[in-house]
Image: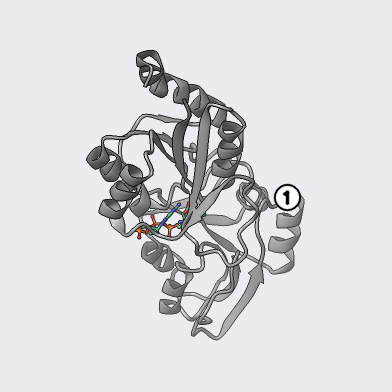
Amino acid sequence: MTHRILILGGTTEARQLAGKLDARADLSVTLSLAGRTENPVAQGVPIRSGGFGGADGLAVYLKENGTDLLIDATHPYAARISANASQAAHQAGVAMLALRRPGWEPVEGDRWTVVDSVADAVRALGATARHAFLALGRQEVAAFEAAPQHHYLIRSVDPVEPKLRVADAEYLLARGPFREADERVLLEHRGIDVVVSKNSGGEATYGKIAVARALGIEVVMVRRPTLPDVPSAETIEALAAMVDHVLEPEIERGV
Ligand code: NAP
């Protein structure tokens, strides 16, 4: 008996988890992507792409495809799909787990200003012109048009379109992971005096935070959104172990 698992992805961990679970003969894995990134990295497992049409649409998908387990492995700031997932799993009567990457904690020497939203991050830059490095998604950076006095260095996976209506913005296209040594060169050469970041957690994008600490640069850190309370694990290994636990009752009943 093969158990069907739908993994909501869009992160490196989701791809790795999917690969790990799909290698098992008793599991059939589909990885779901939002379909926003123009050139997504190869995922190595069967994928489906695009929104489901809200929680109701996802619930229908889960039923129609005979899904046994839904795993939310989306980015910690993708709050809508996480909320939809929890609601849909409940509606469809499907078990659900979440892979929740822990956030970064400030350490000695960090100069973090923690804010609740991107709009608050814009305000936190203040009135005086600064050289800000925006390590945010392309959808979020538009908010910085409200503070056109600053100089912006904007890094995103896909091009920011339309460009910001500000006097000075430079755009970098790059996909992590980013090495700390490279981040240091970037921040020093561009004269960056403030970094605006999400608290993504993990190693892949921590370099800029470590470099900011070393150089005494302020980090405006956008707080994580609240996510639904579902059984979760912090690592791929721990989550993979929970999968058996969740599917076991069915296996024992011979379902
Ligand atoms: P979001 O605001 O939580 O979701 C917006 C809508 O996009 C959802 O309602 C859903 O559409 C669709 N969607 C999102 N993730 C999906 C998935 N894995 N499969 C199918 N549909 C999905 O999400 P977001 O912040 O725009 O992020 C979009 C994707 O990029 C996610 O997969 C996330 O893991 C990834 N990502 C996000 C960030 C970030 O900072 N937000 C960073 C890195 C990667 P319907 O309602 O129509 O189903």
- Residue at the far left: name it: 91
Taking depth in this image into account, of 130 and 199 the one nearest to the observer is: 199
The colour scheme of the drawn protein is: one colour
Residue displayed at 38% across by 17% down = 254
| Corner quadrant of residue 38 | bottom right
**Local crowd size for mark 1, using a 10 Å CA cut-off: few (<14), some (14–19), many (≥20):** some
Q: Position of residue 26 (x, y in %)?
A: 53, 26
Image quarter where the C terminus lies is top left
- Please tell me how many numbered marks the rendered image carries: 1
Is label 1's Cβ within 8 Å of ligand 1?
no
Q: Is residue 227 visible?
A: no
Residue displayed at 26% across by 44% down = 87
Q: Quadrant of ligand 1?
A: bottom left
Taking depth in this image into account, of 98 and 252 the one nearest to the observer is: 252
Relative placement, left or right, of 215 versus 113 is: right
Q: Position of residue 177 (x, y in %)?
A: 67, 50
Please say if 238 is above or below 99: above
Q: Is residue 96 visible?
A: yes
Q: Position of residue 154 (x, y in %)?
A: 59, 69
Residue displayed at 59% across by 73% down = 159
- Residue at the far top: name it: 252
* Residue bearing the label numbered 1: 179
Taking depth in this image into account, of 47 and 218 the one nearest to the observer is: 47
Relative placement, left or right, of 192 versus 101 is: right
Q: Position of residue 210 (x, y in %)?
A: 64, 46
Residue displayed at 49% across by 54% down = 48
Look at label 1 and name its amino acid: Arg
Label 1 element class: loop
